[in-house]
Amino acid sequence: MKVNGKHYRSLWWDESTNAVAIIDQRWLPHEFRIQSVTTMQEFADAIVEMRVRGAPLIGATAAYGMALAMKLDPSDKHLDEAWHYLDKTRPTAINLRWALNRCKAHLSPLPEADRAAAALALAHEIADEDVEINRRIGENGLAIIREIAAKKPKGEPVRILTHCNAGWLATVDWGTATSPMYHAYNEGIPLHVWVDETRPRNQGAITAWELGSHGVEHKYIVDNAGGHLMQHGLVDMVIVGTDRTTRRGDVCNKIGTYLKALAAHDNGVPFYVALPSPTIDWTVDDGVAEIPIEERNAFETTHVQGQTEAGDIGTVQVTPMGTEGGNPAFDVTPNRLVTGLITERGVCEATPEGLAALFPDLSKTD
Ligand code: MRU
């Protein structure tokens, strides 16, 4: 996507430094800062501190982390250690483990002397694949938006609600939930996007920044507004991303997604999930019972970061001194509340049969 007219991916290989460059998302939407990641510690910190975030981007970052590990020491022991070191950075998004497993499976059989080059090539491949997957999700989601647009009076926007940032910045490019929006906008379909703020970290602000940079009309709303808007007929569809989707189609995504799905169900609003195949956990059925939910530092709930009128970025406390916060970062939306899963291979029902029919090659886990 473009920032001030220049195309960026959210992470890339910088030939001039021979290192991975990331956009440090902690400063967005106020400052656009690029960071070079050159040590294993920096890779882990980038994920833990959410300099990079969003399930597909976490996966791609981990793959580059494995590439650095193999450059430092290509032994079996170090391959294993790097896998464990990166795997413990964040627990919920399955893309992290998916990327680490793919790297390990690819590198283990190779002679040590070949591993560094092979690991870097694989990291590039994973990043490129992510871009292509999301582009296709965009095309498949576009077909749904077109259908909704066709039923509206000419010129009236399709009103889409989204939660968190499942955008370009959460992936390597395009985004998942935002990709159909960008495709629809590029085709000239009038759109209006309701952007949930997504407390506590307000990822909605970076979604708003992305949409604004692309020219997509949107409004930033508090997390509790969605139900009201749906009751008043102001939302045509919901599209969200996912951090892990189970074999039967339960969807784990940023905290608050479940409440949006309930409100959508109650109001007959279609609720779609943009799902790249690396986000499917074929080993898990019941998302509520089986997916580990990250509990983040309560500081994120008791404090809010923002920019002052003077232009400084700072943090203020919103709670009384001594009040404890609780910070579960994700929740699970049961498959019965999901209208459809928009994948790179097409749109399917959120059912075991729906997913298995689109991904017969991946759904066999034994
Ligand atoms: O905690 P985050 O910001 O990493 O959570 C991100 C989300 O919940 C996204 O919706 C999800 O990763 C899908 S990204 C395409």
Image: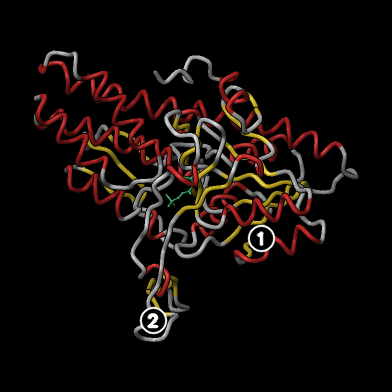
Q: In this rendering, is residue 114 above or below 295?
A: above
Q: In the image, residue 298 lies at what x, y percent? A: 36, 68
What kind of element bears circle 2?
loop
Quadrant in the picture for residue 12: top left
Which residue is at the front of the view, 83 or 282?
282
Label whose residue precedes the other's in the sequence (1 or 2) = 1
Quadrant in the picture for residue 290: top left
Quadrant in the picture for residue 129: top left
- Mark nearest the camera among 1 and 2 is 2
Q: In this rendering, is residue 200 above or below 86?
A: below
Q: Is residue 273 left or right of residue 18?
A: right
Name the residue at 45% across, 77% down.
308
Q: Amino acid at mark 1?
A: Lys
Q: Which mark is residue 247?
A: none
Q: Is residue 69 left or right of residue 267?
A: left
Q: Dividing the image into 4 quarters, which one contains the C terminus?
A: top left
- The 10 Å Cα crowd at callout 1, few under 14, some 14 to 19, many 20 or more, is some
Q: In this rendering, is residue 197 above or below 82?
A: below
- The 10 Å Cα crowd at callout 2, few under 14, some 14 to 19, many 20 or more, is few
Q: Is residue 153 left or right of residue 335?
A: right
User: Outermost residue, bottom direction?
Assistant: 320
Identify the residue position indicated by label 1 in the image: 219
What kind of element bears circle 1?
strand
Q: Is residue 89 left or right of residue 284?
A: left
Q: In the image, residue 59 lies at what x, y percent? A: 36, 36
Q: In the image, residue 357 lies at what x, y percent? A: 60, 18
| CA gap, disc 1 and disc 2 | 32 Å
Which residue is at the front of the view, 289 or 18?
289
Which residue is at the front of the view, 325 or 115?
325
Identify the residue position indicated by label 2 in the image: 323
